[in-house]
Image (cartoon, rainbow, N blue to C red):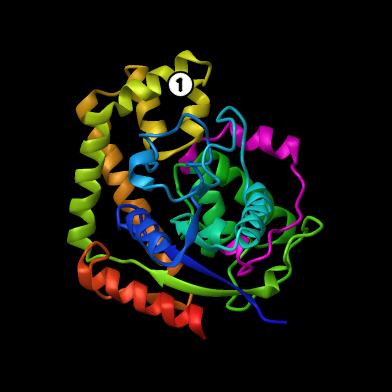
């Protein structure tokens, strides 16, 4: 049976994935599946850098605004909904284009790793919740050094889950270079083994990426990112939950509680985003199938390179 084709556009934050994915979708008749662990949540817009309706240019987007930010959304949830989105896009005669920087989600959806069947351990979670992120990160580093290299070290919820898994099975989930079976799938969905994936990677030079992160953060602040966080809290999103969401929302929660000044908030957040981008690059560089776009993704040469690879992939 001929494998069903799809394209994955991956890379660190602020590398130009969203714009390139939308441009490609318009050129080759595709629809976007967002692979971002925070953009799945309703109301988390400026803080996560979601594409606006104007930026989407009429291209359908999937897996945005599908979860309540008050509740946890897992990689298992993403895989289940992602499979449904892929099937829906195929049925409409379009090409699925996965776009995002949450490598764990992308690899889980496309079969590069198997999600471990480890149920929640309420007693262990209660114990771990008493510790701060630094203590949890050090504990994970001892239990599973490989996972510690890719996880967000200040994201307490993910650290607790990673420790929970490592304690249960001895070591965390690691990507494999070949597809593996998923733990579960819904009836009627195409099995992951039928996917033929073109991996397109974006990895700007470090100085370029640093400038992009700075400019993007300042633009989001100017657009009202702080006010967005204030509104989310007024609607019932607790500061504790905001901190669990990590990065922007953790920093904004501290700012809104007057635990840091605005200047301190922005400086520490920018550093945290830069560190996060480095971890994203490390994760994706473990995938030997990624074709790294050599030219800037927003340039004519970069777009031409991505389009050429995509058309060749579709035609084969």
Location of residue 132 in the rendering, given as x and y in whole percent from the top left corner: 50, 35
Location of residue 47 in the rendering, given as x and y in whole percent from the top left corner: 37, 35
Seen as rendered, the residue at the extreme bottom is: 316
Q: Residue at x 41, y 34 (%)?
A: 45
Lateral position of residue 270 relative to residue 4, left or right: left
In the picture of the structure, the residue carrying the numbered disc 1 is: 232
- Give yes or no for residue 129 being in the magenta stretch: yes
Location of residue 20 in the rendering, given as x and y in whole percent from the top left corner: 34, 60
Q: Residue at x 69, y 74 (%)?
A: 193
Give the quadrant of residue 272: top left
Q: Nearer the viewer, residue 259 or 18?
A: 18
Seen as rendered, the residue at the extreme top is: 234
Residue 286 in view of the camera: no
Lateral position of residue 22 relative to residue 15, left or right: right
- Give yes or no for residue 163 being in the magenta stretch: no
Q: Which residue is drawn at 74% across and 60% down?
A: 189
The answer to whether residue 24 is above or below residue 4 is above
Q: Around disc 1, counting alpha carbons within 10 Å, would you say few (fewer than 14), some (14 to 19), or many (20 or more)?
A: some
Location of residue 150 in the rendering, given as x and y in whole percent from the top left corner: 47, 59
The answer to whether residue 255 is above or below residue 41 is above
Q: Give the range drawn in magenta.
A: 107-134
Q: Nearer the viewer, residue 26 or 69?
A: 26
Q: Which quarter of the image is occupied by the N terminus?
A: bottom right
Provide the secondary structure element on which disc 1 rests. helix
Give the quadrant of residue 66: top right
The answer to whether residue 56 is above or below residue 44 is below
């Amino acid at each position: 049976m001929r494998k069903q084709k799809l394209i994955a556009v991956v890379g660190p934050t602020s590398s130009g994935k969203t714009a390139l994915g939308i441009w490609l979708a318009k050129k080759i008749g595709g629809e976007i599946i967002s692979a971002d662990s925070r953009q799945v949540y309703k109301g988390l817009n400026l803080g996560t850098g979601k594409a606006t309706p104007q930026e989407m240019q009429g291209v359908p987007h999937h897996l945005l605004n599908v979860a309540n930010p008050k509740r946890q959304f897992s990689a298992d949830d993403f895989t289940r909904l992602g499979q449904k989105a892929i099937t829906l896009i195929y049925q409409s005669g379009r090409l699925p284009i996965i776009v995002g920087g949450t490598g764990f989600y992308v690899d889980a959806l496309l079969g590069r790793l198997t999600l471990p069947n480890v149920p929640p351990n309420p007693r262990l979670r209660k114990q771990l919740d008493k510790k701060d992120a630094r203590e949890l990160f050090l504990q994970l580093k001892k239990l599973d050094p490989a996972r510690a290299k890719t996880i967000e070290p200040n994201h307490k919820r993910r650290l607790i889950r990673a420790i929970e898994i490592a304690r249960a099975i001895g070591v965390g989930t690691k990507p494999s270079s070949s597809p593996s079976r998923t733990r579960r799938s819904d009836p009627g969905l195409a099995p992951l083994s039928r996917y033929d994936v073109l991996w397109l990677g974006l990895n700007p030079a470090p100085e370029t990426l640093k400038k992009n992160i700075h400019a993007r953060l300042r633009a989001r602040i100017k657009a009202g990112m702080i006010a967005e966080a204030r509104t989310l809290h007024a609607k019932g999103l607790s500061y504790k939950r905001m901190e669990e969401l990590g990065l922007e929302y953790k920093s904004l929660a501290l700012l809104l509680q007057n635990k840091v000044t605005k200047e301190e908030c922005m400086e520490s957040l920018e550093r945290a985003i830069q560190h996060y981008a480095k971890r994203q690059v490390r994760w994706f560089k473990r995938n030997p199938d990624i074709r790294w776009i050599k030219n800037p993704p927003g340039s004519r040469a970069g777009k031409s390179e991505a389009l050429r690879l995509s058309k060749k992939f579709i035609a084969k």
